Amino acid sequence: MIGRRARLALAALAAFTAACGDSTSPESRQLRVTVDPELRARAGEQLDRPIRIEVVDASGVGLADVPVTLRVLEGGGTVDRPNRVTDARGLIELRAWTMGERPGTNRISVEVEGLEPAIATVQAGAGPAARLEPLGTIPARASVATSLTTLPQVRVTDRFNNPISGARVRYTASGGGTVTDTVLVSNAEGLTRQTAWRLGTLAGPQTLRVSVEGAPDLLMSIQADPGPPSRLTWDTPQNQGVEVGLFVVHSPTARVTDQHGNPIAGVPITFRVESGGGRLEGIAERTDSDGRVRVQRWYLGSQPGPNSVSASGTGFTSIVLTARALATNAPLEGRYFTVAALHVNQGSQSSAGDIPLVAGRAGVLRVFVQASEAGAPAPEIEVRVFGGGTLLETRRIAPPSSETPTSVSADLTTPSWNLNVPANWVTAGLAAEVVVDPQGLVGVTTRRVARYPIEGLPTPMNVVSTPTFRVRFMPLRDQASGQQGDIHALNLDGFTAGARRVLPIGALEVTLAPAFTTDLLTSEGRVQTVLGELQAACRASSFQNQFFHGIFPAASVEGLPYYGVAFLTNSPSSTCSVAQSWDRLPQAAYTVAHELGHNLGRPHAPCGNPAQVDPSFPYGNARLGTAGWDTVEQVMRSPSQYFDMMSYCNPEWISDYNFRQIVDWRRRTPGSSPAMAEGAPGPGVLIWGGVTGSSAYLEPAFPVTAAPFVPSGGGSHRLTGFSASGEQLFRFEFDPQMVADAPSRERHFAFVVPVSDATALARIELETPTGDVALRSRSSVVSQGAPPVSPGVVLSGPPEARTLAWNPVDFPLAVLRDRVSQEIVGFGRSGRLTLDASVEVTLSDGIRGWRVTTGGLVEP
Ligand SMILES: [Zn+2]
């Protein structure tokens, strides 16, 4: 705003009294118009306070509702609502009188019928400042640090171009420039005149800003040009060292500026080798827009010692750049590259890169290139891969980042130069060598160490052979409801998708076995005891080198506190380490991997509060430790985002710790996985049972033709077999297998005891370290030589859907076998089964078996 004094509006005080006639006249009214002496008026603006218009009677009382007409006489302004009536007080307060666009006198006539009109007069000044206008122009360019003395005047006006005098106008110069007067006051014509503007020393656009309150700033711009060329300098460090014959890291670069340091383009400069016998390549002739002129390569001479190169140009003193040619065996200094680490990651790998490789498994070759100093550009590398001394592949690999790292982080998240390694490369004799920056594009002080190995032939990597990993899936079928795990030929791969990625397995063989029928699926407390049934089926099987893995229908065991359960195997040579998982894909993929992890000897990793945590797990919260590699997606798995798959947290990957443990575990399993059962199949009794908490139980034994399996290593539990006369037929000690993921501490065992005279076995006794004893004898129906046919057994219906009913007290277990393969395909305990034609049934009387035939029970 302009100062109060400046906008003094010269308002005229006018008090008009229009009266008519005498007191006898019927017209005794009066019209009074009062203009406040403080009133200020400005061109184009309404009044800042009202004019009072009153109509009163003879005694001075205001008359309401008297029509009043307002008519503009002079000044060109306008009145809002010219026809009005007085209010209850006989009053009109007039503010809405807009002055004309020019400063000067504004007048209106106030008219009431029957009375003499009154005239109101105000003097309007100029309006508020609205514009700054230069009268003339400035030059488009001038040299830095020079003064402009013929600057245009600047006029201050209101919005109708009425000049405003007395306005304070501010001048501000950019870029270090200065003006003579930073504030000027406008004269009567609204004008200010600045005497000089001295430009700053920085080349480029500079501006003079003119401002006044109420108006947009006025900017006057000029291009400040550099002064005359005055300096030639090196923009390259002196005395760089580099091996003889190599080019220096920082290429010779000269720079031309004026005396203020502004770059000057287009100046011709000449370079010349002065000493040392080197050579120059790629020489620019003139300075660029940044004032620089560069030699792309300065190769030093072939002898150790000082080298120099000069730069010269007209009007400049020549300048000299020196460098040192170093002997080829000189100590490492300056910028150079090394291969800090090189290893193959097949899912995980340790910081030291010492987890052995699994033959026949794909992975990624990671080459960690390291620069001796920060800021080095990242070069490409050349990798040569050898198999048993034969070159398999030569490949150039682009850098993973723009700068070369100067260290490798312990978690291996540092970017590496990667090459996918197909499964068939990973055999004994796999080796790789690397040349960093094979084209020599990045300047370094030495290339001596920019290779792997630095000298000699590459050392073959540690590749180990592991047996084919064989998994035998079977849907678990609930005998009562007929529901079974949703696994079939079309979704089979989904169940191994997790294991394939995270477990160190090469060759994988997956079998889908017939459904396995059980009575134990429906109740929560019994589901994990299906593991015992699967283990018994495995013991009697000819597929003991396969991991039996039951898939149960999640729908029939809703609300279980786990999604899978498995034996926590304690030795790589253990056989019949079985597991079961739910059937919900895709989640089940990692459930299967987790349960197989238990079968491969892995306890839990500490996240999500599982039982049986591995006390040696090295990372808090079950973190991975190092970056993983997904051989399927071909991406890294971040150690800060994933959890070890042996924990209960997700998303899951595998830590380098567990990956190494499983590689080691599998290396210790000779021949097959799991170990083949020893011995040829023969007649025996399958003795099985479990221990839950402190109580032990024996399942009904039954006859099998299978490889004997009797433990010889001792243990805290003891099984003894007796004849009817009390003679001891066998006796051995053992430790049952721990179940992981079960809500209660639970262990199981299943043995095949060879018996020469099966009929002799009459009683089995299990002793536990807590003193608990379990017994199993033949049921009373048969133990005292009773006839073999139990009246309780009824087989009815057509062959393809027969119903078997029996007395489960006398025959506590039905063993279901495939009629052709003789593999066990389920157990029944309820006294009722529906069978199809492919299944045959043996009933256990507690110790021995009775084959169910259409003709009745037959003791084999
Ligand atoms: Zn588990």
Image: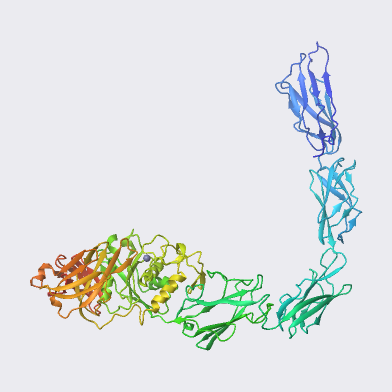
Q: Nearer the viewer, residue 820 or 705?
A: 705
> Where does ligand 1 appear, by image quarter?
bottom left
In this figure, which colouring scheme has been used for the structure? rainbow
Q: Nearer the viewer, residue 69 or 383?
A: 383
Q: Position of residue 502 (x, y in %)?
A: 44, 72
Residue drawn at x 82%, y 39% is 2
Whether residue 216 is visible to the viewer of this picture, yes or no, is yes
Q: Is residue 320 left or right of residue 647?
A: right
Q: Is residue 500 left or right of residue 476?
A: right
Picture mark count: 0
Q: Is residue 838 left or right of residue 451?
A: left
Q: Residue furthest toward the top? A: 24
Q: Residue furthest toward the bottom? A: 390
Q: Position of residue 185 (x, y in %)?
A: 87, 43
Q: Position of residue 118 (x, y in %)?
A: 83, 24
Q: Quadrant of residue 458?
A: bottom right
Q: Nearer the viewer, residue 794 or 643?
A: 643
Residue drawn at x 13%, y 76% is 760
Residue drawn at x 39%, y 75% is 665
Q: Position of residue 16 (x, y in %)?
A: 83, 22
Q: Is residue 395 left or right of residue 732?
A: right
Whether residue 791 is visible to the viewer of this picture, yes or no, is no
